[in-house]
């Protein structure tokens, strides 16, 4: 008897049995489907081939759409990165010009101080 607080023990053989049952059931279903198919084997093969071509085309279309979106996102990031780099370059140039002006002002003040003494 299993106590309410105890979990039943699952063994590897139980999982194996379940997987084997699923496999056998799947095979039995596939065989039954082929035997009871409402159309001939040739028609079934043709239908499978047509569906596989349709699926391939749909998949190719989806992949192309995704690749186009990735390229678009990449281009947006590239343009944004270049714009940000230009902005940072302009800020850096402005800071350098500002510092050069300060150094020049200090140098002029020092020059005047030396000349006046």
Image (tube, grey):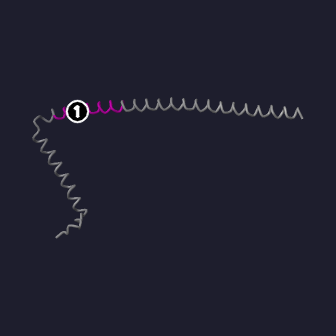
Residue at 25% over, 34% down? 52
Task: Point out residue 103 in the picture as x, y percentages from the top left corner.
Answer: 75, 34
Q: Nearer the viewer, residue 15 or 52?
A: 15
Q: Measured along the vertical axis of the image, is residue 89 above or below residue 10?
A: above
Residue at the limit of the structure toward the bottom, as seen here: 1
Which corner quadrant of the image does residue 47 belong to?
Answer: top left
Residue 104 among magenta residues? no
Say whether residue 114 is left or right of residue 34: right
Give the residue at mark 1.
51
Residue at 47% over, 30% down? 76
Residue at 29% over, 31% down? 58
Residue at the limit of the structure toward the front, as seen here: 116
Give, as a single range, the part of the protein colored magenta.
44-64
Task: Point out residue 90 in the picture as x, y percentages from the top left corner.
Answer: 62, 29
Please name the predominant secondary structure of the magenta segment in the image.
helix
- Quadrant in which the N terminus is drawn: bottom left
Say whether residue 74 is left or right of residue 20: right
Residue 55 among magenta residues? yes
Q: Nearer the viewer, residue 52 or 74?
A: 74
Task: Point out residue 102 in the picture as x, y percentages from the top left corner.
Answer: 73, 33
Residue at 43% over, 29% down? 72
Total numbered badges shown on the rendered structure: 1
Q: Nearer the viewer, residue 36 or 21?
A: 21
Task: Point out residue 3 in the picture as x, y percentages from the top left corner.
Answer: 20, 69
Q: Nearer the viewer, residue 39 or 4?
A: 4
Q: Measured along the vertical axis of the image, is residue 8 above or below residue 77?
A: below
- Quadrant in which the C terminus is drawn: top right
SS at badge 1: helix
Residue at the limit of the structure toward the right, as seen here: 117
Say whether residue 27 is left or right of residue 110: left
């Amino acid at each position: 008897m299993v106590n309410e607080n105890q979990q039943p023990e699952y063994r590897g053989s139980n999982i194996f049995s379940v997987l084997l049952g699923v496999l056998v059931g799947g095979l039995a279903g596939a065989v039954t489907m082929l035997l009871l198919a409402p159309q001939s084997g040739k028609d079934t093969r043709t239908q499978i081939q047509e569906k596989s071509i349709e699926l391939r085309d749909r998949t190719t279309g989806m992949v192309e759409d995704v690749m186009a979106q990735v390229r678009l996102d990449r281009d947006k990031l590239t343009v944004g990165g270049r714009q940000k780099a230009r902005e940072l370059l302009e800020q850096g140039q402005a800071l350098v010009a500002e510092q050069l002006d300060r150094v020049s002002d200090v140098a002029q003040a020092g020059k005047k101080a030396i000349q006046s003494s």
